[in-house]
Amino acid sequence: MNFASDNVYGVDPRIMQAMVDANYGTAVSYCHDDGSKAAEARLSEVFEKEVKAFFVVNGTGANSLALSAISPPFGGIFCHETSHINTDECNAPELFTGGAKLITLAGAQGKITPQAITEKLKAFGHGEHGAKPSALSITNATELGTVYSPAEVKALADVVKPKGMKLHMDGARFANALVSLGCTPAEMTWKAGVDVLSFGGTKNGGMLLEAVVFFDTSLAEDFLYRRKRVGQLVSKGRFLSVQMLAYLQDDVWLANAKRANRLAQDLAKGFVASNRVQLFAPVEANEVFAVMPRKMFDALQAQGAHFYDWPMEGLAADAVLCRFVLSFATPEGDVTQFLKLVRETP
Amino acid sequence: MNFASDNVYGVDPRIMQAMVDANYGTAVSYCHDDGSKAAEARLSEVFEKEVKAFFVVNGTGANSLALSAISPPFGGIFCHETSHINTDECNAPELFTGGAKLITLAGAQGKITPQAITEKLKAFGHGEHGAKPSALSITNATELGTVYSPAEVKALADVVKPKGMKLHMDGARFANALVSLGCTPAEMTWKAGVDVLSFGGTKNGGMLLEAVVFFDTSLAEDFLYRRKRVGQLVSKGRFLSVQMLAYLQDDVWLANAKRANRLAQDLAKGFVASNRVQLFAPVEANEVFAVMPRKMFDALQAQGAHFYDWPMEGLAADAVLCRFVLSFATPEGDVTQFLKLVRETP
Amino acid sequence: MNFASDNVYGVDPRIMQAMVDANYGTAVSYCHDDGSKAAEARLSEVFEKEVKAFFVVNGTGANSLALSAISPPFGGIFCHETSHINTDECNAPELFTGGAKLITLAGAQGKITPQAITEKLKAFGHGEHGAKPSALSITNATELGTVYSPAEVKALADVVKPKGMKLHMDGARFANALVSLGCTPAEMTWKAGVDVLSFGGTKNGGMLLEAVVFFDTSLAEDFLYRRKRVGQLVSKGRFLSVQMLAYLQDDVWLANAKRANRLAQDLAKGFVASNRVQLFAPVEANEVFAVMPRKMFDALQAQGAHFYDWPMEGLAADAVLCRFVLSFATPEGDVTQFLKLVRETP
Amino acid sequence: MNFASDNVYGVDPRIMQAMVDANYGTAVSYCHDDGSKAAEARLSEVFEKEVKAFFVVNGTGANSLALSAISPPFGGIFCHETSHINTDECNAPELFTGGAKLITLAGAQGKITPQAITEKLKAFGHGEHGAKPSALSITNATELGTVYSPAEVKALADVVKPKGMKLHMDGARFANALVSLGCTPAEMTWKAGVDVLSFGGTKNGGMLLEAVVFFDTSLAEDFLYRRKRVGQLVSKGRFLSVQMLAYLQDDVWLANAKRANRLAQDLAKGFVASNRVQLFAPVEANEVFAVMPRKMFDALQAQGAHFYDWPMEGLAADAVLCRFVLSFATPEGDVTQFLKLVRETP
């Protein structure tokens, strides 16, 4: 029973097979292969818009690179205080942008509100002493397993775009948000004002399956240099592009996300039914955040269940906030078995 | 009537005269002049400890350089959300440190508490995903005109030192805090756990009068390279060191700070007596923070009084938080005249 | 006939199979998996010394990260003017080190001599105006397909080590050099003074098969943070470590390198025998550098042979320096067929 | 007798007096004072073009900031191998640009030729592996005391401008070159293709008298943020701008430069007449480079003459290349006295 992360699991067999199938003959190296071109074209279809797509190695690379294209080194990048770029990328955004400042916002359920960004912006723009507001970065699905609707994204864009700021979306769990929302990829992104997207597939079945996708393609100028400079360009690039092609083929990505989301719902419903664990945030993607007593936490771990406690200020002394991540590959029985443990653990 | 900042005024005439007097013959350039050595020795006397002191050009340089000596690029530097390094140095700390992250803490009256830093640290140290906690930076006097006592500094040091973190003090208004506290420079710094100090004198009578002072001199290794690399080394260095010597001679620095602090007290008392302006924070140095109605703010400005409104969340809609800075050179009569305006402005 | 690079070919089938075999169940993510530990232990055996090994994504990452561990941002890194870090990594070393300067040295056959580094060092160390000499980086096999003997490496170490400088080896083609030299991995590296090695396997059969290997393990402190910060940490790390394990098993790495080197010898001998193409440098690894007339170059390309011209100052106007890279996977017949073309092309 | 540098001397008394005179009342801080505006306007007159001018603290700051405005972090900045930005700024250009690479060119007498840059550029522009050529930086007068004529500058501009590169001039000794050339400031700069100039006055009589002057004012966008971010903005900015105003008034700058240049000519002629010291480069500004035997070098130093030996590869074993810098303030008699020593020292 491993709910620690979506990346404790391996690779979707169809994606792995595509990698094996790609392993013959020669191919132009450094992501100038035909597959990279085809995958970019496929993303343009998916997003109903001519995009520029660059395949990179991981989410940290995708996010930090995307931000480097939309923020000068003297810029300020507004983000949620729980965002991955702020808490889990060990200063990579600061490095890749040349020192831009992440300016953090609080907000319930991992989400930024138009009010919060409006209020925070008041302290900026009075000359060169503070950072120059350059970008807003949001995560969809959020770090707390909730999702922004297209209307919510649009409302944020309406605040920042008139100020010349760009809008970035961290889509590490893009597919999970997409199938939860039931909208199109276009509606979820550029139609709502997103300029550049970190399109993540590693968590949803890839091995190294991440792309920076520009909807405002003018921002992609010189991005080849940027990707190379930060060490996110791989020589045998065909093994990246083929993952993307297999991921998007036959709706593999959507099916995987649906399964993970459904398992999350199953787990959440079990928690509610058990009356022993309290949901901390709405379950809208493939993560469940829930609070349990420290004693139960320890007992469940001791019985072989893997999941993380999550730092959160303001909880009761003996309460633990726990994160459960459901994956395309989580065995069906693990949820059932774990819920049984929850009900039975004293 | 100019209360906008301590740096709208010029240079103490004694310091200016010392610069004029230094303008003859030749001197070794690049801060290897005899005056630089003498000024370092003088600071060692003042602090009752052999220090390493490096003269630099401004407070941004001093702070960001000091931080670069105590935080790796993957480090986390904890500071108050209102600190100068966070709000008024346009990402210079991020630049000079190579991308270290400023992690901000809230706290009443511009001060960080041991509880706040203890709580925040809980989210760090669980591996390489977040920044590595490397330093705590505090400002004394604070950005809200309050001061940390040596005991308060010590209590913060006791939290961070056992974790291998270093303690930096931004002393842009060091003298104002010192004369307010009535302690010794040693008690205010290294005896309370401070490793490195930005010792500022520009606001208190200098032209470019700033030094990075290391109490833990092992941290100063290669600092000559650091200072040069960031452009804070000046060629005709004698004109920096002579300012420091004149500043510390005959207690010029203490006298200037006392005068500024007294004027701040006069202004604050006048506000209280007027019953029309509310103090926002205790007045413990040379700054007064006070709240007045927007209408009064506009009327006072229109009558030629210069002072800034200060961004602050949570105020009533028509209330303005104002900052008044009193300087060694503020004319005595300006306070009297301004208080008259306050009382008379409808 | 593709001699453009070793990375136009795919992955050794044994390594690919190992990746497929690793694709089941769960594994601890972020390179804390058992495989990463096993691969580090295996490298310790190979190098006859307890090493610290960190698996990364590509050679640019390995080199730039290694340099960041041995050079401060104000440091100077001495390297050959043709080195990959200088010409083919688009400022990544400058980025990862925080701005260290690459100081280039000329030298015949892609190699640095003790005399060259001794002479160049004379301009440094006179104070903080120039970079502080911090490291020497050499490439083995070199960019011109030659190799440094252990004695040659030792002679360089003897110049720089007494000055407190560290020695880095870029081993993008480590195995090719090793089997050419006929020495042990230990003799080629730490026994000759190397502190840190970029151990590359991608060109010799891997997909993303690169490691930073520390022989002076004290330099590896906080390297987990460094790797994460620059975006070289992958979540599903088992797919990196398993490549290394398969590569080192059953001498796959040595056999692949031997084959590539032998093909290079075959090609070089054919050039000499043809009397139409002149070798430019001794052929000591898996690359052949040779000069031919522009007309022949164009004719060969037109007939479907892929290889690059190589920028080189001082050639005759109609002469082209060409690079031919032979790989573990280059079809045997390609060399024969190409040599036939060389002989027959007018 | 001090010929070590132009910065071992103090400040022109007229400039110092102007600083004293400026020391009254209040002024808007952070270089938004009226004097800064006036000095910018004055520079526009001097250069016969509406310029954007930013006052900074030193030459390292001016150069590195100027380069940061014309080179992206993935850019390549071409410069002479002896240029100040390459040898004497301890990686500040790398820092301020975010990691751009300095690509060095050899060239007689400290000067870059169109041929040299043309040849070097051949290795670039073949994709994202190397730095993107972004700028050429030349120094006038050069580090070897020679000058570029407007026609020579134009010839360099004609090579790089069609490639989208920008042209920077390091004018640390701008006035010395100007009076040597006998042309106008406009002819020496923008009329010859210069986009941005480091206009230095510290060596020629200022205390901290440096400006970044943009002729292509579109490059100055957001430069206020840039200057602040790197710590080159001073709070009491009036003391910078007033130096510039005094420097440009009554041709102080031209008179000072003429005097220094004439002294250099006197020294050079004396060397030639002595037949004991050989000139190494034409004397075209205020520096003399000459070769003497080691024994003479030691004897002269022992008699109290201060001047530096200059690192130079390829000299005879017992020969020393010496640099003599003549300043606006060098006493007339020092040259006479030193030449006497030269003639008499055995």
Image (cartoon, coloured by chain):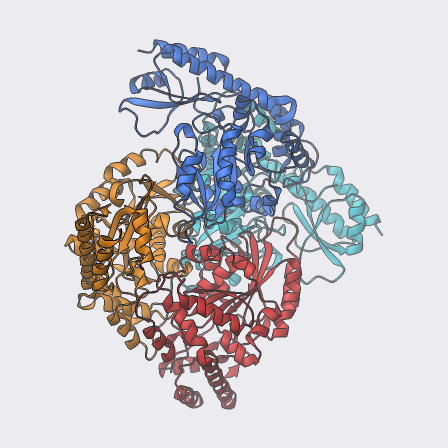
Chain colours: A orange, B blue, C red, D cyan
Relative to A299, residue B290 above or below? above
Residue at the far front in the pictured view: A346
Residue at 32% x, 56% y is: A301
Residue D265 drawn at (x, y percent): 69, 46
In the displayed structure image, the side of residue B302 where residue C288 appears, left or right: right
Residue nearest the observer in this picture, B86 or D123:
B86
Residue A147 drawn at (x, y percent): 21, 49
Residue at 54% x, 53% y is: C72
Residue B307 in sight in this render: yes
Relative to B207, residue C190 above or below? below
Residue nearest the observer in this picture, C121 or A9:
A9
**Quarter of the image that includes the N terminus of chain D:** top right
Residue nearest the observer in this picture, B62 or D111:
B62
Count of number-bearing discs: 0
Residue C302 drawn at (x, y percent): 36, 81
Residue D174 drawn at (x, y percent): 56, 44
Residue A141 in sight in this render: no
Relative to C77, residue A35 above or below? below
In the displayed structure image, the side of residue C325 where residue A105 appears, left or right: left
Residue nearest the observer in this picture, A334 or D290:
A334
Residue at the far left in the pictured view: A182
Relative to C303, residue D35 above or below? above
In the displayed structure image, the side of residue C56 where residue B228 appears, left or right: right
